[in-house]
Amino acid sequence: MPDDSSADHEATQPFGVAPRTTDGSEQPEVGNKVGDGDGADGDDMEQSRELPPPPLPPRPSLHVPSSRPPASGSFRLSKRTSRPQLLSQPTTALSVADVHTQGRGENATATSSSASRAVSRKHSASHSGRFLGNSDSGGEDSASVISYAPTLDARLDGESLLGDVPAEATTPAWRALSAQIERDNPFETVPPESDVATLQIQHEFDEIGSVDAHGSNEETLLEAWKTKLKHFFILSASGKPIYSRHGDDQLISNYIGIAQTIISFYQGADDPLRGFTAGGARFVMLSKGPLNLVAVSRLGESDAQLRTQLESLYMQILSTLTLPSMEKMFSNRPSTDLRRPLQGTDVLLDGLADGFTRGSPSTLLSALECLRLRKTHRRAINDTLLRVRSPNLLYGLIVAAGRLVSVVRPKKHSLHPGDLHLIFNMLFEAGSVRAGGGENWIPLCLPGFNNTGYLYMYVSFFSTSERDGSGPHERPAATGGKDDELAIVLISAQKEGFYELRKMRDDLVEQLENNGSMDVIKSAIRKGHASCSDIVPGTVLRHFLYKSRGNVQFTMPSFEPYFHGLGHRRKLMSLYQTLHESIHSRTAHLKVQHCVGRDATALAWETPLFELYCVAGPQATRASLAQGANRIVQWIRREEERVFIIGGAVF
Amino acid sequence: MAARMQQGGRPGGARFAQFKLVLLGESAVGKSSLVLRFVKDQFDDYRESTIGAAFLTQTIALDDQTTVKFEIWDTAGQERYKSLAPMYYRNANCAVVVYDITQASSLDKAKSWVKELQRQANENIIIALAGNKADLVAEQPDKRAVQTADAEAYARESNLLFFETSAKTAENVKELFTAIAKKLPIEQASQRGMRGPAGRPGGVDLGNRQEAGSAGGGPGGCNC
């Protein structure tokens, strides 16, 4: 389980967002009263809930690092007990008083309504009572692994009942457990000088060679294989390997065999294995019909995030085969070797997998990024798309540098972000379409749209760096990076629609050239992302992700100058993953979360309209972070129709 | 765009014609590499599989007076795309069927493509057989799995043009396409006044007009 063990969390309300009512603010009072949490019957907790919430305390200078403060429902129980152990963790921190965990592992009954909250408190209180007498059996619904550690001190019960990882644990067992989990924490375990993941990721995408004829290099190759931070495997239900990101069949066949054994053991018991942790890596399994997908990660993603990644790989397979044809293959012959029908799509799976390993905001947020354009410019492009739309067109997209410029679509079909992700991956990650240097006609299934049949996609790339009017398909191959390329993607259900869509492309390009839109697009591409300080002058923020939930789109500033290079970006993305998980995990009910760590402070803020994740330097105060966040929201309000496509061209 | 450029303006006596060409063959024999060499005079050592099919154009000057424009369908060799192949060869004037001279099985696949083309495609289709990866054999002769004489004999009896090529070194690539161009009914096609060769459906006309226009600048400008 990824965890925020050293990051400190709080629920607060800097933005006027309704926070979860009791958190934080009432904690001081409660904490003071509680000296004997054990066996509490819950009455005094009810009382304490009636107390008027005091104002938020100022940012404290308390050096109590990495408190593992309890989750909302029962903070009072653990407060006293956790305090003495806090000192062992080297982070800066907020005071315990205004800190809250995200409540992962919290009693399942805890919800944001105050009524059920009261219930859950009683619940946990009664647990702690029971815990005293039966300290190694734990509370059944707060089933954190740690709750069951035999060395558990009864005085810690409140905390462990919450399922929190006691980072302050001192027994060897605790340390062993928490060391594993803490490795996921970007702040703590990844100090700049000894950042294994950051160093390792430079070699993450290096090819592992093939085993030679005598197998003499197998040892070396396996060593290299084991250093990879992330692995993906896909195997059929009968255990045939279908895909592995690293290593060839011969090298990994033993491991595939083990994976198959483990998976089928649990499937045989009708209790499918969903995930486990071993050796600092998290293993997550996803079973999809005749396929089993496995992710192995040392990058600290949550199970939910890894599962999303596996879903995406599965979607890619469906996109190649369609669901019915894949199912037919397996029902005809359960031992089907899916590698043959999937031949040549490894690059697409690799593209997706490597995107996940690098950390893609788009996948994390399940949203798309748009090219920032003036509203009038975007409308002109939309109008052009509608004007030149050919009768058999289903979807039309203009994509620049991996960002959406405009969409034309039928009123009753919106675009599924997962489908778009597959298309973008095909266009911009896998080289073959781009490097072809021409136009392409690609049959593909868009599983989000319809997983039973194929659509046909016309793709035409052209470079925006050349302005000599040499025509769209005279693009210099393999020269310009993907950052200056414009793709026109036209999708139809007509197998024979190539020439029709090609004509539409010609008309579209001609009209965009004539009405100046092409120049607008090109200059927007050249401008790239604005930096954070361009967007919010003088801010402490170094980077942010803003997702508009209604539009399923996100926007972000440039990674430069703070997050230069793969390692830094990966670290930033790990932080975003942690923040994202903290407000998305099933048991989380936070609306706002503030994390402080050794090399960054961060804030996640969720409302029904948006999700915002901000990152600032380690010295940034909470107030300045909050102010930065507010100013970003103001900026988005002003710019909403520039940074997002609202509606698009609909017919 | 191109279609709006001048339509006429060709020097007296110049001939221009354009033809549809399709590349077929097993995956990884080098179809895309041959096209990339022909169209861009480039070569990638690590080329990813073609997805679907790629459409490219290239113009060659046969002589001072004669220009031929190829509209090339570079198809993916994977089995799963097989059902789409007829769409690409149905109206093709010429086809290049490619095999890998270091893989005997790829010639079998090539033969089956030839058979299919002779049965299903345009009856006047010009078919060329290309044994690619000659560079590998030049380096290590023992890598050769298909003898030149065998393939040549097969080509002769099936009435195919035949070349052993290397997309990597460019050996015989231009020769291959030039030989095809020379066998094509240029006179007939160009006399039909930019309408393209016989038997093409209306859908292609757009391409014809456009390409005709862009070639209007004169044959000299089109030489690759």
Image (cartoon, coloured by chain):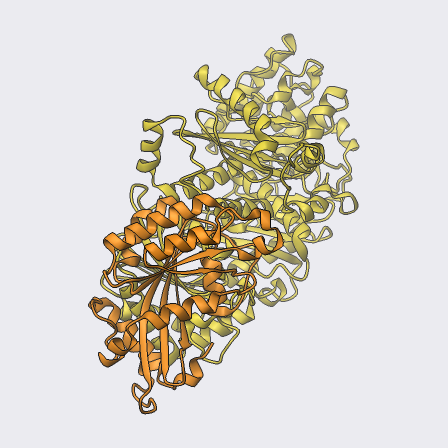
Chain colours: A yellow, B orange
Residue B172 visible to an observer of this rendering: yes
Query: Where's residue A222, x and y in %?
Result: 67, 33
Q: Residue at x 70, y 41 (%)?
A: A94
- State whether residue A648 appears in this view: no
Dividing the picture into quadrants, the one containing residue B184 is bottom left
Q: Quadrant of residue A527?
A: bottom right
Quadrant, the C terminus of chain A = bottom left
Q: Horizontally, is B214 left or right of A358 in the view?
A: left
Position of the N terminus of chain A, as image quadrant, is top right
- In front of the other: B37 or A204: B37
Q: Is residue A596 above or below residue B64?
A: above
Is residue A177 left or right of A525 when viewed as pictured?
Answer: right
- Find residue A270 and report its horizontal and vertical position in percent: 43, 17
Question: Would you place residue A531 above or below residue A42 in this image?
Answer: below
Q: Residue A414 at what x, y percent from top left?
A: 32, 52
Give A33 or A154, whichever is nearer the viewer. A154
The image position of residue B137, as x and y in percent, is 57, 53
- Which residue shows up at 31% across the image and 76% down it? B17
- Residue A518 is left or right of residue A394, and the answer is right
Viewer-proximal residue among A138 and A400: A400
Tally the marks. Answer: 0
